[in-house]
């Protein structure tokens, strides 16, 4: 070896050794605090993953569930924006939302975001994927050290709006090989590598917010091939099979929800063409969920193809989660990282065309197509529950929740039946970071956090003492974008308000006037088949009074400066 090469090797060797040790040293060990990874799917159904009864191939999620805990009663807010708001702020949307003359949503000044809660405990925070919060707040000021933000959710192959650390990135050409689910993971892995090399002694939070399997159904060819022909049996057969597996696993003990043959999804046209989306999508599309046997051959083939695309998107997300787990192992962080997996709402029944439009001649799943799974497959994805995204029936608000933490969860593979909600994530992470709920309220004038830490559930299957879970989808949320984009609901504008106790659920029925309520026994009838309102009217009055008082209180809190 020549002298110049020897001198260069001597100069670089300490750097190489430092980077190698940093890549292998457990992140966050100097503080004794665990790392956090929260993985959020977009419009994934309760029973899509294999570990929740589904036939979709999700080996990495299945391994996380086998090595951790599965929660059977975790609730979101039925829709992407309010769910993410609760997850990241720790508050109900009614508390943390203040409308400004119908033109947008202003946050109260006391609102904080998850990284801001964790920063006092030494955490560095990273975000990759969907942001989608109507917060007048930049990602950096929210406390994220690095962020890859995918704003355009209409194009999995060539997004026209995506940002790295708030710098706009160019739109990828379709032949560049960009795919959103992979790109979101790539950036997350870059952040973890940098963290391990530069700030390894600090614990980290990674908020990994995928856009899959949200419409449009854009999938990679190799993933689509895995499911060719698999869904020709139809949604009735798939629902039945999933329901039986869920019962065998002990995740549910209810009957299968009654088919809603007359309730269609929001059907929205977001193109300049003054045509109904059904006429664009062709004869194979349907806006209802008839029995599978009543569909034409053309409809059956078209619908089976769409569910294959949905499954392909879920499998690709699972594959990318596997890459994340490999990276956590590479930096020595897998044992003491608390990994959460959930979905922002139930599967979506929407039938629409927007983005670049839909070419009926294009290959399904390609960039020139624009499809959604529709009400039939959304019902199957949400098995065994009733209805879909947006509605606060169980199909809209029930999410799988997996928690994996080898260093802290000793009862691996067990199921937890406590009722929990996205508002519980902030207090849970604060407690795991070594703080108390009172610590999270420091230096803010806002109201106390409404959620409860779910850490006690890690040790045993116990209920949490808590106030009833409050759900509301006011008109202001449903018409957030613009009057031209307002959703048209075929069966009225209700079905978006609920109150959940340990046993009962109050819900405003579809198409009913304000003040009309249904009530269900969630212990024996979580699929909401038997409305008990006429049998237990006193309970209806009690819970509706709580709901109305809660709404008034939350609305007052939203006006606190």
Image (tube, helix red, strand yellow):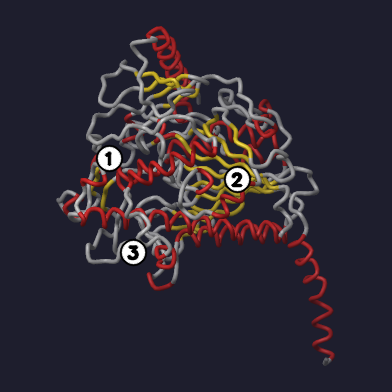
Q: Which residue is mark 1?
A: 265
Percent from the top left, x then y, of residue 340? Answer: 59, 43
Label located before the other in sequence (3 or 1): 1
Q: Using the rendered image of the protein, determine whether residue 134 is visible from the camera's viewpoint.
A: no
Q: Are marks 3 and 1 in contact (CB under 8 Å)?
A: no
Front of the two marks 3 and 1? 1
Give the answer, above or below, for where 501 lies relative to 38. Answer: above
What label sits on residue 250 in the rendered view? none
Q: Is residue 8 left or right of residue 180?
A: right
Q: Position of residue 472 (x, y in %)?
A: 40, 27
Viewer-closest of 208 and 363: 363
Cα–Cα span, label 3 and label 1: 24 Å
Residue 292 as seen in the image, left or right of residue 54: left
- According to the picture, the residue beneath numbered tag 2 turns out to be 65
N-term-proximal mark, 1 vs 2: 2
Report the Cα–Cα distance between label 1 and label 2.
32 Å
At horizontal 40% and vertical 67% (from top left) the residue drawn is: 221
Whether residue 512 is situated above or below residue 489 in the rendered picture: above
Residue 355 is at least partly visible in this image: yes
* Residue named by callout 3: 367
- Residue 475 location (% of width, % of height): 32, 30
């Amino acid at each position: 070896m020549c002298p110049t090469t020897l001198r260069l090797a001597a100069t670089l060797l300490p750097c190489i050794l430092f980077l190698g040790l940093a890549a292998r040293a457990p992140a966050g060990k100097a503080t004794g605090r665990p790392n956090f990874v929260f993985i959020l799917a977009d419009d994934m159904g309760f029973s899509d993953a294999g570990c929740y009864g589904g036939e979709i191939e999700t080996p990495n999620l299945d391994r996380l569930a086998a090595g951790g805990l599965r929660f059977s009663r975790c609730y979101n807010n039925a829709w992407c924006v309010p769910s993410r708001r609760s997850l990241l702020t720790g508050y109900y949307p009614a508390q943390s939302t203040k409308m400004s003359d119908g033109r947008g949503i202003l946050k109260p000044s006391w609102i904080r975001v998850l990284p801001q809660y964790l920063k006092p405990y030494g955490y560095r925070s990273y975000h990759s994927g969907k942001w989608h919060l109507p917060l007048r707040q930049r990602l950096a000021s929210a406390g994220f050290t690095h962020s890859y933000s995918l704003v355009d959710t209409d194009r999995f192959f060539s997004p026209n709006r995506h940002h790295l650390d708030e710098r706009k990135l160019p739109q990828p050409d379709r032949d560049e090989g960009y795919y959103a689910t992979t790109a979101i993971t790539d950036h997350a892995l870059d952040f973890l590598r940098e963290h391990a090399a530069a700030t390894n002694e600090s614990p980290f939070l990674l908020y990994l917010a995928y856009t899959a399997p949200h419409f449009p159904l854009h999938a990679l060819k190799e993933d689509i091939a895995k499911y060719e022909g698999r869904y020709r049996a139809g949604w009735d057969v798939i629902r039945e099979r999933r329901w039986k597996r869920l019962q065998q696993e002990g995740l549910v003990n209810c009957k299968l929800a009654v088919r809603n043959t007359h309730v269609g999804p929001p059907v929205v046209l977001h193109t300049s063409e003054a045509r109904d989306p059904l006429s664009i999508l062709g004869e194979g599309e349907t806006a209802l969920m008839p029995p599978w046997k009543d569909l034409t051959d053309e409809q059956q083939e078209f619908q089976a193809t769409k569910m294959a695309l949905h499954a392909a998107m879920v499998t690709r997300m699972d594959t990318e989660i596997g890459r994340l787990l490999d990276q956590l192992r590479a930096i020595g962080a897998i044992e003491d990282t608390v990994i959460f997996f959930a979905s922002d709402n139930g599967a979506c029944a929407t039938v629409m065309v927007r983005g670049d439009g839909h070419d009926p001649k294009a290959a399904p799943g390609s960039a020139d197509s624009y499809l959604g799974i529709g009400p039939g497959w959304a019902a199957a994805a949400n098995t065994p529950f009733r209805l879909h995204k947006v509605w606060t029936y169980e199909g809209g608000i029930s999410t799988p929740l997996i928690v994996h933490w080898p260093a802290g969860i000793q009862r691996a593979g067990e199921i937890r039946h406590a009722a929990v909600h996205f508002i519980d994530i902030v207090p849970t992470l604060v407690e795991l970071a070594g703080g108390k709920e009172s610590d999270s309220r420091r230096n803010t004038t806002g109201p106390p956090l409404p959620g409860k830490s779910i850490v006690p559930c890690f040790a045993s299957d116990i209920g949490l003492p808590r106030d009833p879970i409050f759900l509301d989808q006011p008109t202001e949320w449903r018409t957030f974008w613009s009057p031209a984009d307002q959703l048209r609901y075929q069966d009225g504008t209700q079905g978006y308000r609920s109150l959940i106790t340990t046993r009962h659920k109050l819900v405003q029925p579809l198409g009913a006037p304000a003040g009309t309520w249904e009530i269900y026994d969630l212990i024996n009838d979580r699929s909401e088949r038997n409305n008990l309102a006429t049998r237990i009217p006193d309970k209806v009055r009690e819970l509706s009074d709580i709901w109305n008082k809660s709404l008034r209180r939350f609305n007052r809190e939203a006006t606190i400066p």
